[in-house]
Amino acid sequence: MSKSILALCRQAPYGNALAREGLEAVLAAAAMDQTPAVLFCGDGVFQLVQQSPEGIGEKNLRRNIQALPMFGVETLHICRASLQQRGIDPVAIELPGAEIQLVENTTAFIDGFDHVLSF
Amino acid sequence: MTLHIVSKSPYSSSALADCLRTCGNGDAIVLIEDGVYAAQTGSEKLQDFAGKAVFCLRADAEARGVAVTATVDEIDEARWVALCTEYRPIVSWFK
């Protein structure tokens, strides 16, 4: 029986490698037919805002996140409180081809999975 | 019910605060490595644990000279493993 997997992404995109590693793990799992759900919370919501990291020699993480629907991750779960705390409008993080689902109760949401990968 | 494992000091990381934000009724928290500093008797972090099942790895607390408060349950590795089998899922808060 296959187990449900959640990738919990709570790091901002460029301060450390975890944000990108999380995305790569999700893509790898999806390619192996183990498509995980993804929840962005805390500073992880910063991964989704419009960004231009060329000046710091980084690749645009949001652009890579846009590839998720092509790998079968069509819904992105986002913690509403984290957005609100950081002054981010949910409209500003919309991604073409992906459905944004705002999560009110992260406790209950996380509880619904067999495994949680933290990034 | 979820088992939350916190391994960073509450004074240098948001790991514990983020964990507490998603920790619901019936969930449990295990403090390991630098996470055990939150369990120090008299720590102001203790009030956040009210009504929650909180465990702390004894070896990590002893190694750091942390005097664990009475409301936090000191456990050994075997009990930690047992907890990992009793809860699902397990969430690591390590940053």
Image (spheres, rainbow, N blue to C red):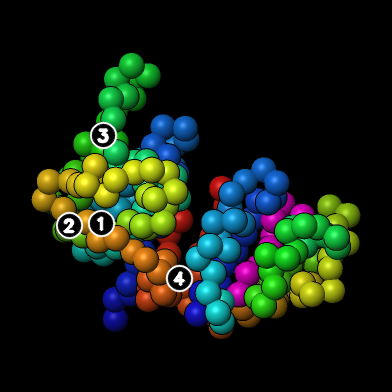
**Mark 2: which amino acid?**
Glu
Q: Are marks 4 and 2 in contact (CB under 8 Å)?
A: no
SS class of the residue under badge 2? strand
Closer to the N terminus: mark 3 or mark 2?
Answer: 3
Q: Residue at horizontal 37%, vertical 50%?
A: A83
What residue is disc 4 on? A107
Q: CA distance from mark 3 to mark 1?
A: 16 Å
**Mark 1: which amino acid?**
Leu
Q: Are marks 1 and 2 in contact (CB under 8 Å)?
A: yes
Is residue B33 one of those drawn in magenta?
A: yes
SS class of the residue under badge 1? strand
Is residue B85 at least partly visible in the picture?
no
Q: Position of residue B66 (x, y in %)?
A: 85, 57
What residue is disc 1 on? A76
Question: Which of the 4 quarters of the picture holds residue A81?
Answer: bottom left
Q: Chain of mark 2?
A: A
Closer to the N terminus: mark 3 or mark 1?
Answer: 3
Q: CA distance from mark 3 to mark 2?
A: 17 Å
Q: CA distance from mark 1 to mark 2?
A: 6 Å
User: Does mark 1 fall on the same chain as mark 3?
Assistant: yes
For the residue carrying disc 3, how many other residues have a C-alpha within 10 Å: few (<14), some (14-19), or many (20+)? Answer: some
Closer to the N terminus: mark 4 or mark 1?
Answer: 1
Give the extent of the magenta segment.
B28-37
Is A45 located above or below residue B49 in the figure?
above
User: Does mark 1 fall on the same chain as mark 4?
Assistant: yes
